[in-house]
Image (cartoon, rainbow, N blue to C red):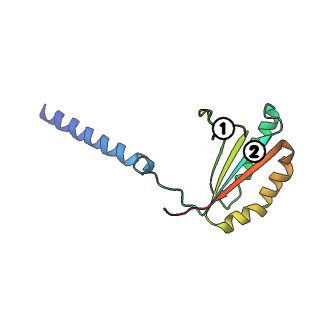
Amino acid sequence: MKNRRSFLKTLSIGTALTSLAIMPKRMFAKNEPIKNELLHHVYFWLKNPESETERAQFEKAIGRLLKVETISQSHFGIPAGTENRDVVDHSYTYSLLLLFNSQADQDSYQIDPIHLKFVEENSQLWTKVVVYDSTYIAS
């Protein structure tokens, strides 16, 4: 009986330690800032946001756009279901956040053939595009 208890105790401790070892690092991080050199946030308003065909075309085109090598991270999304407040704009169709490690990487992205082709082949789909670029400042 003692061996069984000892075995179960060892097994429990091993399982707990293994669980901790495989948990994502983010679970232990405390609000770590995004320190990439440049964040490029683009908001798109599609002409026909109700058109499944046009949405599919746009989403596929974004998939190709994200192959630009100088993009270090990205997030492509739609308006969140957060509460309506005066300071929250849910009117856009899609948002695209691109992170670059340097200003030079973002400059390269702007003239990359993949980006230029994206704009050329898809600009007829949107009525408005707004871009916000920002860089990290240490506080």
Horizontal and vertical percent position of residue 134: 63, 59
Q: Quarter of the image holding residue 48?
A: top right
Image check: 124 left or right of 2? right
Circle 2 SS class: strand
Choose between 137 and 107: the one closer to the eye.
Answer: 137
Horizontal and vertical percent position of residue 30: 42, 51
Label 1 close to label 2 by CB (< 8 Å): no
Question: Can you identify the residue that label 1 sits on?
Answer: 79
Question: Can you identify the residue that label 2 sits on?
Answer: 44
Residue at 31% x, 41% y is 16
Residue type at the position of mark 2:
Phe
Q: Quarter of the image holding residue 37?
A: bottom right
Horizontal and vertical percent position of residue 75: 63, 47
Q: The N terminus appears in which quarter of the rendering?
A: top left
Residue at 78% x, 34% y is 49
Disc number for residue 103: none
Image check: 139 left or right of 88? left
Residue type at the position of mark 1:
Pro
Residue at 78% x, 37% y is 55
Residue that extends furthest to the bottom in the rendered view of this protein: 104
- CA–CA distance in space, label 1 to label 2: 11 Å
